[in-house]
Amino acid sequence: MKFIPLEEKFSWGEASHMIADLGYLDSILKEGWLAGNSIGELMDMYVDRISGEKAFGFYGRQFPICAGVLDCRKRMPLTVHPDDETAGPRFDFLGKAKLWYVLSAGPKACISYGFSSEVDASQVYPSCLDGSIYSLLNNIPVKAGDSFHILPGTVHCAEDVVLLEICESSPLDFVLCDWGRGETDPDNDSLGLVEALDLIDYKAASKPVPSDPSLLADSDEVAVRKMKLEFPLHVSREDDAFAVYCCVSGKASVQVASEDGITQSEIKPGESILVPAEVEALELVPHTDDTVLLEAYVRKGAAEDEYINPEADEAPEDGEFSQDDENYLD
């Protein structure tokens, strides 16, 4: 399933949303007999076939992942995001774990990831208001191919880079500082500085190093694997889970066999494709020697009911209580 990119323009650059299910921003299916339907409409009709029963247990009818390209010509606003446990009760949304993958980098390319040393709210609040917060950040020069798994609570921004962003489907972007552009008002913006102060991780941060270099993000909310395709790859999928494939270099086709023959769709850099949960097998076929894909998926599903004990004895029939039974009613 390929979707029509949705474009947004900002003072710092542009965003091209390839897959988005946010209500105010919904991707439209580009190809096939369901073309023209939004991803929200598709999830309403075919949620079990698209995201799978396991994901439905946690995410319901919202598609769990967004994918897009951010062209950060200028420094983007400094933001932070809550986790699922905070975002759900407070805002009735998902939290926002994310992966940033650097597609290209200019001479001033930099990603700010957390703080260079431990700070507190009394330092962060005034420095966000006057823009001096940048000196407190862990500012890391970057190049194409670098990636950052940004967990909830980590303040972050980017400058002079083009990024592939894969994140949870959430609109919760808490802006801490817009570098004096006057686009946000911290006192009035409901997703602004004041409300974000208790969401921030104030400890010193360093770029996380994954134990598996190919696993760029390894969390229940967003898991992303980097795949260099030198030969066609057969992928068997029997876990009732969707996958999103994003192309970062080269070109590839995703091929699926059905009763009607082989269905295939090509993706090139900056494009993504959604493989629904009902697809049990597919072929990833590289068209160039430098083809690299990112495979994104989620691990969260319905939590087991802690009140149900599968090892408990069968309940007595109606009326069969004894004084030795803890359920005995006096």
Image: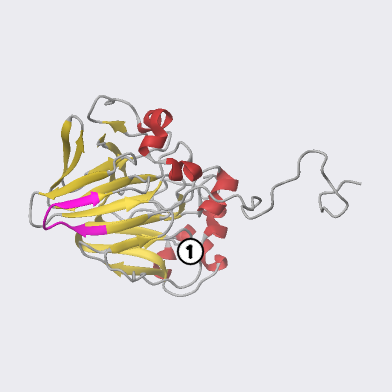
263 displayed left or right of 114: left
285 displayed left or right of 241: left
Residue at the farthest left position: 288
Task: Work out whether residue 101 or residue 37 is closer to the camera in this orientation and state it.
Answer: 37
Q: Is residue 173 magenta?
A: no
- Quadrant for the N terminus in the image: top left
**Where are the magenta residues, as a range?**
226-235
Residue in the image at 40% along x and 28% along y: 45
Q: Is residue 232 magenta?
A: yes
Residue at the farthest bottom position: 117
Residue in the image at 54% along x and 50% along y: 303
Q: Amino acid at mark 1?
A: Ser
Q: Where residue 66 sits: x, y (%)?
A: 35, 45
Among the 4 quarters of the image, the one containing residue 319: top right
Q: Where residue 267 sits: x, y (%)?
A: 17, 43
Label 1 sits on a secondary structure element that is helix
Q: Where residue 175 sits: x, y (%)?
A: 45, 52
Task: Work out whether residue 304 or residue 207 is closer to the camera in this orientation and state it.
Answer: 304
Among the 4 quarters of the image, the one containing residue 279: top left
The majority secondary structure of the magenta stretch comes to strand
Res 133 seen here = yes
Q: Which residue is mark 1?
A: 127
302 displayed left or right of 11: right
Residue in the image at 56% along x and 53% along y: 86
Residue in the image at 66% along x and 51% along y: 307
Res 16 seen here = no
